[in-house]
Amino acid sequence: MNLSATGLAAGEYQGYVQVSGTANPAVTTIPYWFAVPGPTPAGISVVYSDLQDSAQSIAPEAVVFRIVDVAGLPFSGLATPTVNISAGGGAVRSLYRTGTVPGTYAIDLRTGTSTMEVDISVGSITQSVLIGIQ
């Protein structure tokens, strides 16, 4: 048996296949799940973020996040995320791909003087992350 995603819209699909044999009429139910990758980013999942950093310090990999498509799969398209500090001061030192899973990025920060709000955007999606400053 083969499942084909040809012609299906991006997203996830699931169900059950029931199988029986000629030698044994017992029916076995097998669950299945598969996904059709989407062409645009649909979400930002924060994998890790610092809970608290020292004021005006360097914070490597302060936030690690993954861009996912409509099926929740790592997004491997061309969309590039942007990062903005909307509260607390500080600055983005760098934004870069990290790890072996597509769509995974890390942000290195220069911390500010109060709780930082880091806004990550890609396409029409924005995810905010708070980092406490001591």
Image: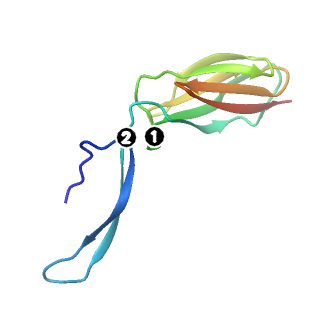
Which residue reaches farthest left? 22
In this view, 21 is above or below 60:
below
Which quarter of the rendering shows the N terminus?
bottom left
Q: Amino acid at mark 1?
A: Val
Q: Residue at x 49, y 21 (%)?
A: 80
Q: Quadrant of residue 107?
A: top right
Viewer-side residue, 26 vs 106: 26
SS class, disc 2:
loop
Q: Does residue 32 appear in this view?
A: no
Earlier sequence position, callout 1 versus callout 2: 2
- Return the x and y of residue 73 as percentages of the image width and height: 44, 41
Viewer-side residue, 5 vs 117: 5
Image disc number at residue 29: none
Graded by Cα atoms within 10 Å as few (under 14), some (14 to 19) or many (20 or more), the crowding at tag 1 reads: some
Graded by Cα atoms within 10 Å as few (under 14), some (14 to 19) or many (20 or more), the crowding at tag 2 reads: some
Viewer-side residue, 103 vs 8: 8
Q: Is residue 69 left or right of residue 122?
A: left
SS class, disc 1:
loop
In this view, 10 is above or below 54:
below
Q: Is residue 8 left or right of residue 56?
A: left
Q: Report the residue marked by disc 2.
A: 10
Q: Are marks 1 and 2 in contact (CB under 8 Å)?
A: yes
- Return the x and y of residue 43 as percentages of the image width and height: 53, 36
In this view, 20 is above or below 35:
below
Q: Residue at x 81, y 19 (%)?
A: 56
In this view, 63 is above or below 36:
above
Q: Quadrant of residue 31?
A: bottom left
Q: Amino acid at mark 2?
A: Ala
Q: Report the residue marked by disc 1.
A: 70
Q: Is residue 82 left or right of residue 119?
A: left
